[in-house]
Amino acid sequence: MPEVPEILTAPLVVEFPFTRSLGPVQSAFLTGLRERTVLGVTCQDGRVLVPPVEYDPVTAEELSDLVEVAPTGTVTTWAWNPGPRRGQPLRTPFAWVLVRLDGADSALLHALDAPGPDAVRTGMRVRIRWAAERTGAITDIACFEPSDDAPPATAPVPHDGEFADPVTGITAPARLDYTYAPGRAQSRYLRALADRRTVGERCPACRKVYVPPRGACPTCGVATDAQVEVGPRGTVTTFCIVNIKAKNLDIEVPYVYAHIALDGADLALHARIGGIPYDRVRMGLRVEPVWTEGGRFPDHYRPTGEPDADYDSYKELI
């Protein structure tokens, strides 16, 4: 029986802290949460939207008429979350709920602290549980909790949106944790890299060699399985100078990241360029891989000392 190759897997994290400035509507909404005040915005047709938006979803007109709504509301729909994940509002099982706050015509998504799914229902009354420490973010609402309060008869109250020390910007962390399992083509590619070789796959129709291989030709759409060893040297086709230091990456800026067309390949891969001042990297520069002890892939590419490649030899790979 043929030997079954090891299935390769690796934990991967994609993380990006998104920083944005706030306009007057969003600034008032988040600052209001810090002050335990929930603001909505009135549309052209009289509807009150919470959370508020800056433009009318029907007419696209700019909106600015803020109103204060109640911290109590009604669940319009829900879903039970039996296993909270890192970064979610509660550490114990809870319900994701859409809550139409009293005085609003739209629903706000947040967590409901409930003992179990049997305790949650559409139409149930809930109220905001405020966070002990509030900074001007949606997390100032710690969660919702069940409430026996009847809906108030009062309408939303106009609000000027003015607060002391308003929140003018936020940083929203976005993170995705997952386990990546490559297919057969990329597994062969990764195993070859561990042996300090680079292999691609040739399309049986157009005869192009793709690195890294994907198991199918992106142009012809046919399966590829004929392996071709390429490189190890290649040509810089285009590049960029990185001036912002990445978190958890021990590389001093500025440095150069480039697309490199390995000899024998018809697709450029990307890698860091080292061994040369960043301002001397250029299109057509001939480079070779540099491996570190125990590394499973090239740490970076450095100049070979060869004459630059002619533009016509790599122009189709830019």
Image: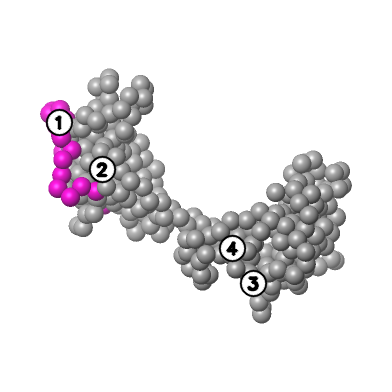
Q: In the rendered structure, which amino acid carries the disc numbered 1? A: Pro
Total label count?
Answer: 4
The residue sitting at 56% across, 59% down in the picture is 241
Residue at mark 4 to residue at mark 1: CA–CA distance: 58 Å
Q: Nearer the viewer, mark 1 or mark 2?
A: 2
Can residue 189 be seen in the rendering of this structure? no
Marks 3/4: CA–CA distance: 12 Å
In terms of secondary structure, what is the magenta stretch mainly? loop
Q: Measuring 80% from the left and 43% from the top, which residue is drawn there?
A: 222
- The relative height of residue 65 versus residue 131 in the rendered view (above or below) is above
Horizontal side, residue 257 vs residue 247: left or right? right
Q: Mark 4 points at which residue?
A: 279
- Tell me: residue 119, above or below residue 256: above
Magenta stretch bounds: 141-167
Give the side of residue 160 with respect to residue 116, left or right.
Answer: left
Inter-mark Cα distance, 1 to 2: 16 Å
Callout 3–callout 2 Cβ contact below 8 Å: no
Name the residue: 27% across, 19% down: 45
Going by the numbered disc 3, the residue's amino acid type is: Gly
- Residue 239: image x %, image y %? 62, 56
- Image quadrant holding the N terminus, namely bottom right
Amino acid under label 4? Asp
Mark 4 and mark 1 lie on one chain; the one further toward the N terminus is 1
Q: Is 113 placed left or right of 79 in the picture?
A: left
For the residue labelled by badge 4, is the local secondary structure a helix, a strand or a loop?
helix
